[in-house]
Image (cartoon, rainbow, N blue to C red):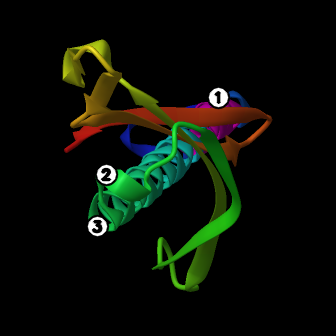
Amino acid sequence: MKLRNGQNGKKGFGIVEVLVSIAVLGFLYAALNHLQTGNRDALLRIRGRDGAIEVAQQVIDSLNNMGLALLREDTIRFEGITRTWQGQPGLISHDMTVEYSAVILTSPDSIFLVADSSDYENVSHAFAKRVDVTVSWPFKSSVQSIQVSRIIR
């Protein structure tokens, strides 16, 4: 039996074509979802590192303002330093809060040590000290950290 225009009764899409297109669209959706998750994790990691750099710089500036005479050669720990950012990756605004901990190690450097002696006494004086600040924060199931060093005169 022959139909008009030589179409032989075939119109539209077959079930195989529809199932293949659904599978392709499913794979594309999964790939885009994975890409967005990776982008979000990278943004959170960068945001956390920016906050750690800010914390380290504020600690070093505070120590520099104290002056060399008040700096002890010691290890100091600070816990519970928080930073919060507001973001809107979609239609809903989210707050990101990261809790940092800082470890400050102050030590004299032999380069900055001046020694003098007389018949009665030996005197040494440090005219600068090295300050190492390590800032740590949790990210997913690991602990990230940065270290910043500075010489305070």
Tell me the SS state at disc 2. helix
How far across and how far down the image is residue 70, in percent? Answer: 42, 58
Residue at image coords 20%, 22%: 114
Q: Which residues are magenta?
A: 18-33
Q: Quadrant of the N terminus?
A: top right
- Near mark 1 (Cα within 10 A), the count class, few <14, some 14-19 or many ≥20, is few
**Element on which disc 3 rests:** helix
Q: Amino acid at mark 2?
A: Leu
Q: Quadrant of residue 115?
A: top left
Disc 2: which residue: 68
For disc 1, the marked residue is 20
User: Where residue 54 sits in the image (x, y, percent)?
Assistant: 37, 59
- What residue is shown with label 3? 65
What residue sits 32% from the left and 21% below the top?
Answer: 120
- Chief SS of the magenta region: helix
Residue 51 visible here:
yes
> Which part of the image, by quadrant, shows the C terminus?
top left
